Image (cartoon, rainbow, N blue to C red):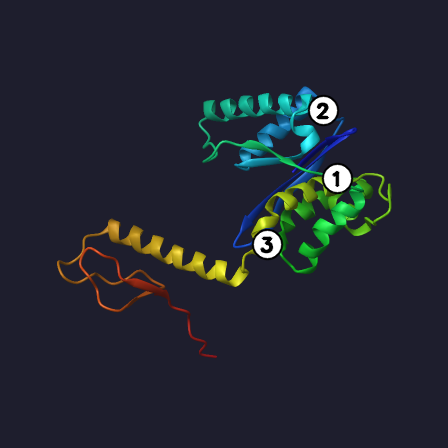
């Protein structure tokens, strides 16, 4: 999420896995929109391998959106020239409709996510921001802890506004069951582990070799078809 307004550009990097949100990185760029700030932010997007950048809808087709698109193309080209791995998908700008009072919109979006413990925070980045000794009012979590449904309750709200845009973009994943998603992810990991092991060494003609650690066979083995796999949970011998 990016909020290119005023004298600071607020930005956050947020990801989703198994219906959980992960706040990976965040900050603010002082001085507003400059060639340097656009280039720095574009490199940040490419280095995190972001697939989308959420902007307010009124900012997507603006001159800022066009300038940032050009900066993204340049950043991708520079990473390719340096031999770095590029994102698996092209990164695109996504419009997020923002209407009504800003403060109420931010609270309505973020409060349920925080209260339901559906967002995890990068503690290393949190400590880093603390050590940077930024002005409290400019930090993300100061804004998150002090925002109220009152106009202009914060001196700065760029970073919390960017977080709201990112969460709003990913909100559809909240409808999924966390435990079911984790179970499905575990099964997929087990299948991938089986395939890697199977392709790494030859098998006997009619009988498979020992399964990799953490996996076991269930049911009969059929030649040419991998057996069903379950995760073996270690027993508590305490």
Which label is found at residue 99?
Answer: 1
* Nearest the eye: 196 or 19: 19
Q: Nearer the viewer, residue 142 or 94?
A: 94
Q: Would residue 26 be seen by someone viewing this image from the given angle?
A: yes
* Distance CA(mark 3)–CA(mark 1): 22 Å
Task: Indicate the secondary structure of the residue bearing disc 2.
Answer: loop
Secondary structure state at the residue bearing disc 3: helix
Q: CA distance from mark 2 to mark 3?
A: 33 Å
Relative image position of residue 8 (x, y in whole percent) = 76, 31
Q: Relative to 10, is 22 on the left or the right?
A: left
The quarter of the rendered structure image containing the N terminus is top right
* Circle nearer the viewer, 3 or 1: 1
Q: Residue at x 15, y 58 (%)?
A: 204
Q: Quadrant of residue 63?
A: top right
Occupied quadrant, residue 7: top right
The mark that comes first in sequence, 3 or 1, is 1
Which is in the foreground here, disc 2 or disc 1? 1
Q: Which residue is mark 3?
A: 174
| Labels 2 and 3 touching (C-beta < 8 A) | no
**Residue 81, x across and y down, in percent:** 46, 22
218 above or below 199?
below
């Amino acid at each position: 999420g990016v909020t290119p307004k005023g004298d600071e550009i607020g930005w956050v990097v947020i990801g989703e896995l198994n219906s959980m949100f992960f706040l990976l990185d965040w900050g603010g760029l002082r001085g507003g929109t400059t060639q340097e700030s656009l280039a720095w932010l574009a490199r940040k997007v490419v280095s995190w391998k972001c697939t989308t950048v959420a902007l307010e809808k009124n900012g997507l087709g603006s001159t800022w959106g066009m300038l940032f698109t050009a900066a993204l193309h340049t950043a991708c080209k520079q990473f390719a020239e340096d031999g770095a791995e590029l994102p698996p998908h092209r990164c695109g700008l996504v419009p997020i409709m923002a209407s009504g009072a800003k403060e109420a919109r931010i609270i309505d979006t973020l409060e349920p996510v925080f209260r339901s413990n559906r967002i995890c925070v990068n503690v290393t980045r949190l400590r880093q921001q603390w050590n940077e000794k930024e002005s409290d009012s400019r930090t993300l979590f100061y804004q998150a802890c002090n925002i109220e449904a009152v106009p202009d309750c914060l001196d700065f709200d760029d970073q919390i506004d960017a977080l709201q845009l990112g969460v709003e973009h990913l909100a559809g994943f909240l409808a999924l069951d966390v435990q079911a998603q984790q179970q499905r992810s575990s099964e997929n990991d087990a299948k991938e582990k089986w395939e890697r092991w199977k392709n790494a060494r030859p098998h006997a003609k009619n009988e498979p070799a020992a399964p990799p650690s953490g996996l076991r066979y269930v049911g009969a083995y059929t030649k040419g078809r991998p057996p069903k796999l379950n995760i073996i949970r270690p027993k508590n011998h305490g």
